[in-house]
Amino acid sequence: IKHIDKKENTLSLCFISRISEKKNLNFAIEVLKEIKNSKIIFDIYGPIEELEYWNGCIENSNNLGDNVFFSYKGILKPTEISSIIGKFHALLLPTQNENYGHIIVETLQHGRPVILSDQTPWRNLENESVGFDISLNDKQKFIESIEKLSELNQAEFNTITTKCVSYINAKLNVEDIKKQYIKLFNS
């Protein structure tokens, strides 16, 4: 696990996804407008698929507080994703729909928590201390989850980092075992 410096009331978030209405970047911006007491870095990576939607996001980002640093970083090559994830404290992806979410898995493998909508198969993340899966109808819970992660100190964040890796390794191992059983019983 590559550790990252974590100061209290500071949080670096990344959004790594296609930029389209379905991925809900504008909702993330709406949430970040409500964060007042923390320094937030919010970097966006991904291809702009819906230019009109993106232009709306840019316009909306102009209303972010002085404490939120919003930046579009372009498209990542698959080989770059790993090194980029390690530079952030968490992934913010309030998607309207995700069947699996490879970026979610990769983020957890790097020991980083995820802040997701409940429209992914990744559930009960808060109980596992590896992130949040929140209803898109509960904007306040998104705000609170970002504030909660922001308030963590180095030791608290390092604990979450370790839990993320253990959690995803256990999950992926279970999936492999299921596949092996299915293969066994189908042969």
Image: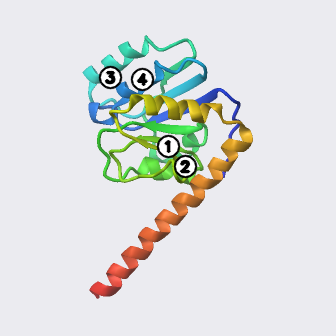
Q: Amino acid at mark 2?
A: Val
Q: Are the residues flagged by discs 1 and 2 in contact, CB closer than 8 Å? A: yes
Q: Is residue 122 left or right of residue 1?
A: left
The mark nearer the N terminus, 2 or 4, is: 4
Badge 1 element:
strand
Which residue is disc 1 drawn over? 114
Badge 2 element:
loop
Q: Amino acid at mark 3?
A: Trp
Q: Quadrant of residue 118?
A: top left
Q: CA distance from mark 1 to mark 4?
A: 16 Å
Q: Residues within 10 Å of mark 4 (few under 14, many from 20)?
A: many
Q: Is residue 181 left or right of residue 64?
A: left
Q: Nearer the viewer, residue 38 or 98?
A: 38
Nearer mark to the viewer, of 1 and 3: 1
Badge 4 element:
helix
Can residue 65 be seen in this snapshot?
yes
Labelled disc at residue 29: 4
- Look at the picture and state if 37 lies above or below 20: above
Q: Residue at x 56, y 25 (%)?
A: 41
- Look at the picture and state if 63 lies above or below 123: above
Q: Are the residues flagged by discs 2 and 3 in contact, CB closer than 8 Å? A: no
Give x and y (percent) for residue 27.
36, 27
Nearer mark to the viewer, of 2 and 4: 2
Q: Residue at x 54, y 63 (%)?
A: 169
Give x and y (percent) for residue 167.
54, 59
Labelled disc at residue 54: 3
The mark nearer the N terminus, 2 or 3, is: 3
Badge 3 element:
helix
